[in-house]
Image (cartoon, rainbow, N blue to C red):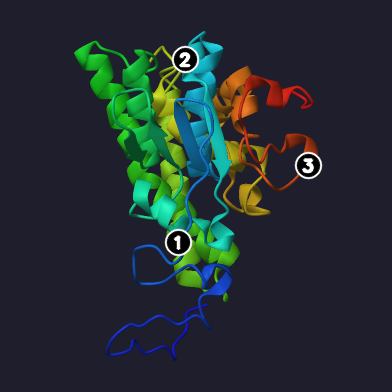
Amino acid sequence: MADPTYTPPTVWTNDTENGGKFASINRPTAGAREEKALPVGEHKFQLYSLATPNGVKANIIFEELLEAGHSDAEYDAWLINIGEGVQFTSGFVDINPNSKIPAMVDNTGAAPIRVFESGAILMHMAEKFGKFLPTDAATRAEVLSWLFWQVGSAPFIGGGFGHFYAYAPEKFEYPINRYAMETKRLFDVANNRLKDTRFLGGDDYSVADMATFPWLAPFVTGDIYGEAKTFLSIDEYESVARWVKEIADRPAIKRAKMVNRVWGDEDAQLPERHGAGDFASKAV
């Protein structure tokens, strides 16, 4: 229900006592809070992330490239535990001034290239290997439109619905309903598109699917935000469900979901990933 007693302050300031689960990391300032270098492995690509829906996007492009036979896409994936504030260490801030996962370093050239923001990572890797991003102008435009649709829409699902429904210290009617309706609308956008096409960008699997799958799939399978699947009537979106099932069966997706995961079934967790052999003991 609405809170009739709240009066906005003259100036908003940080209130660590009233921010819910993420109060300790939700501050109005940027930059490093601790001097600490990031670990570096032996591969040319260094990924620093956590298996949240945003983080999984980066895992997917690496695992899909490897699955497609691009052995030079081997990478080290290092755990960045955002609940512990690791994203605010100096090493991480150096590669992502915004202190959000995922972020990566490409050491294939004469000088290291930092890449942050999940959509940028997907495009960087797709263009580097000539895979999962079409070169035909019309198809490329369609894929990029859906990629950036997802980039612009995900905050309303996670930071909007997910936060107020699952993480806010109090459950108030207005923000939950506002973002629940937006989440349903986004599912309807995807469902309408997928009634006519196999994948979001058209006939072929692309970075647009890699970006969107980690956000929509957990609602379809009921693996996120408790009973949200039922409350949001996710079963209504049959074309999204068909698309989720097809993508979920891809071997690269099964591996990607494990990388930098530190919760749930232990057999589905791989806190760090340094080579294909790390999956040997996992059910993939």
Name the N-terminal-most of marks 1 and 3: 1
* Residue picked out by circle 1: 35
Q: Amino acid at mark 1?
A: Glu
Reading the image, the residue beneath label 3 is 265
Pick whichever of labels 2 and 3 is earlier in the sequence: 2
Disc 2 crowd, CA 10 A, few/some/many (<14, 14-19, 20+): few
In this rendered view, identify the residue nearer to me: 39 or 279. 39
Residue at 67% from the left image edge and 53% from the top image edge: 227
Mark 3 burial class by Cα count in 10 Å: few <14, some 14-19, many 20+: few
Task: Quote the CA–CA distance across marks 2 and 3.
Answer: 30 Å
Disc 1 is placed on an element classified as: loop
Q: Is residue 128 above or below residue 218?
A: above
Q: Nearer the viewer, residue 128 or 34?
A: 34
Q: Position of residue 36 (x, y in %)?
A: 48, 57
- Mark 1 or 2 closer to N-term? 1
Query: Which mark, residue 72?
Result: 2
Find residue 67 and report its image quarter: top right
Residue at (34%, 65%) from the top-left corner?
A: 30
